[in-house]
Amino acid sequence: MSTPSTSIADSQRLLNAEKRAEQWALTVLRGTTFTDCLKFNDLAPTLEVQTPEGKTVTIRGSDIYDSRTWKKFLANINQDENICQLTEVGERLAAQYKTWLLGGHTARYRALATEADLAWLERVITLAVTRHIMEQKYAAYTSQGLETFANPGTAIEMGNLMLLNQVAREIARSVHHIIKEPTQAQQLIEQFCEEQYRQMQALLKREPLLPGGTPPSALPAQKEEK
């Protein structure tokens, strides 16, 4: 039987693990679309694989992230859509999602058989599940006022990231409207996204100011009470 001190220690361990998971999520979720997110993480947006019958099928990472596919999966396992925990819950869902895609969804995923193909699938699933949960955390935080983030500062960073993605989508639409050559337009969009992300990261690394504009490190060290 656990003691109160053990329960507190376990809670703190889980909280710290969730904080680390949230911070990792912020580093891998940039991208105006999930396809962009895959590219930023050096993952191919699609895979072409051969079925046992010799037919070539295309597996799209965006289909794995697709909200309809995600909701169908959650309904299949009787899981509520309001998921706000990356550690343990998110990890369990990622494993279940892989099993469902390979055995319970469309037959095309059963063509993924090589070690490299399955490794790609696992990484794409990890990003897809992480993105869905982080977006759900932020939605519940903003619309319901729930403290869904283990680190309150992560909510601000997530908001900045989503704003950046939204602005980038608007810029992309404008660029494609003005520049008709697809490759040139895509290069310009990617340059914009890289610069905006760099500036956001530089801003987030700055030490937050206390009321009055004073950084915490500038305060005199407090002496320990004897």
Image (tube, rainbow, N blue to C red):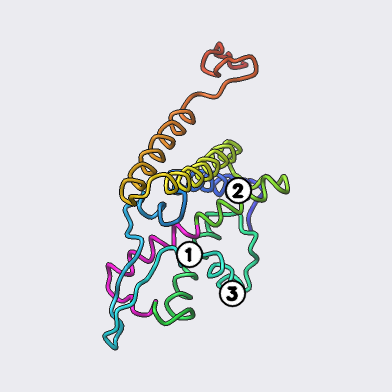
Q: Where is residue 200 in the image (x, y as percent from the top left)?
A: 47, 33
Residue 118 painted magenta: yes
Residue 148 painted magenta: no
Question: Which amino acid, by three-letter code, is at mark 3?
Answer: Ile
Q: Is the Cβ of the residue at disc 1 closer than 8 Å to that at disc 3? A: no
The residue where tag 3 is placed is: 77
| SS majority, magenta | helix
Q: Position of residue 24 (x, y in %)?
A: 45, 45
| Mark closest to the chain's N terminus, 1 or 3 | 3
- Vertical arrangement, residue 170 with respect to residue 102, above or below: above
| Left or right of 88, for residue 43 | left
Cα gap from disc 3 to disc 2, whole angstroms = 27 Å
Q: Is the Cβ of the residue at disc 2 closer than 8 Å to that at disc 1? A: no
Q: Residue at x 44, y 70 (%)?
A: 98
The region drawn magenta spans 109-129
- Vertical arrangement, residue 197 with respect to residue 58, above or below: above
Q: Where is residue 107 in the image (x, y as percent from the top left)?
A: 42, 82
